[in-house]
Image (cartoon, helix red, strand yellow):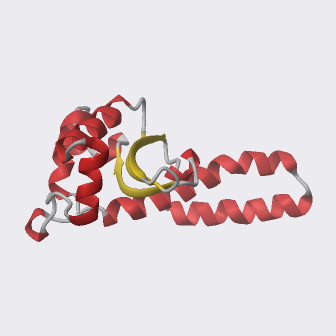
Amino acid sequence: TYVANYNKALEQLDAAVSKGDASAVVHLQSAIKFNGGGHVNHSIFWKNLKPISEGGGEPPHGKLGWAIDEDFGSIEKLIKKMNAEGAALQGSGWVWLALDKEAKKLSVETTPNQDPLVTKGSNLYPLLGIDVWEHAYYLQYKNVRPDYLTNIRKVVN
C-alpha cells in the first residue's frame, strides 16, 4: 500500500509540476513523505527481525558490538536508552539506532509518524529501526509500549 500510494503521489506531483500548480505540489509533499517513509522504514524494520530459533535476540558482535560499548557503555545501556526514547515518543513513530557518518559514532534518534531517518540529517545511516506505531504492538501488548520495546529485542537480528 505504501508503494502504491507513493507512486500515485509521485504521478500527481509530476502532473502538478507540469501544470505549475504550486499549491498541489506543496500539498503532495506530506503524502510523499508518509508513504515513501512508510515503505523505507518498514523495509528496514523487516530486515532487522529474525526468529529466536534462527539467532534473533543475539547481541551484536565484532565492530558493531565494540562501537556500542564505546558509544553507550554496553548493550544494556543502549537498550535502556532506545526503550526510554521509544516509549517517550508522543503518538506514532520510530526509534532508531543510527550511525552518524560525520561524527563517526552511533546515536539513538526518533522520528515521528513515517518520517524516515534521513529527515533528521543525511549524515545518519539507519542500522536498526523499531516501529513504535500502536499497530506494531497493540494486539499483543495493548497500549503498553514499554513491554513491546523490551520484548522486541528477542527477535532483533
User: Is 128 or 135 nearer to us in this picture?
Assistant: 128
Res. 94 in view: no
Res. 5 in view: yes
User: Is 122 or 3 nearer to us in this picture?
Assistant: 122
**Looking at the picture, how far across and down is residue 121, in whole percent?**
57, 49
Which image quarter: residue 148? top left
Give the answer, above or below, for where 33 lies relative to 39: above
Looking at the image, residue 53 sits to the left or right of residue 152; the answer is: left
Q: From the image, which quarter does the C terminus lie in?
A: bottom left
Give the residue drawn at x 42%, y 32%: 91
Give the answer, above or below, for where 7 lies relative to 95: below
Q: How many marks?
A: 0
Which image quarter: residue 87? top left
**Looking at the picture, how far across and down is residue 4, in whole percent?**
56, 66
Looking at the image, residue 30 sits to the left or right of residue 16; the answer is: left
Query: Residue most toward the left?
Result: 53
Query: Residue most toward the bottom?
Result: 54
**Looking at the picture, how far across and down is residue 82, in whole percent?**
30, 40
Which image quarter: residue 93? top left
Give the residue drawn at x 55%, y 53%: 118
Looking at the image, residue 152 sits to the left or right of residue 111; the answer is: left
**Looking at the picture, how far across and down is residue 110, in whole percent?**
43, 40
Give the residue drawn at x 22%, y 58%: 156
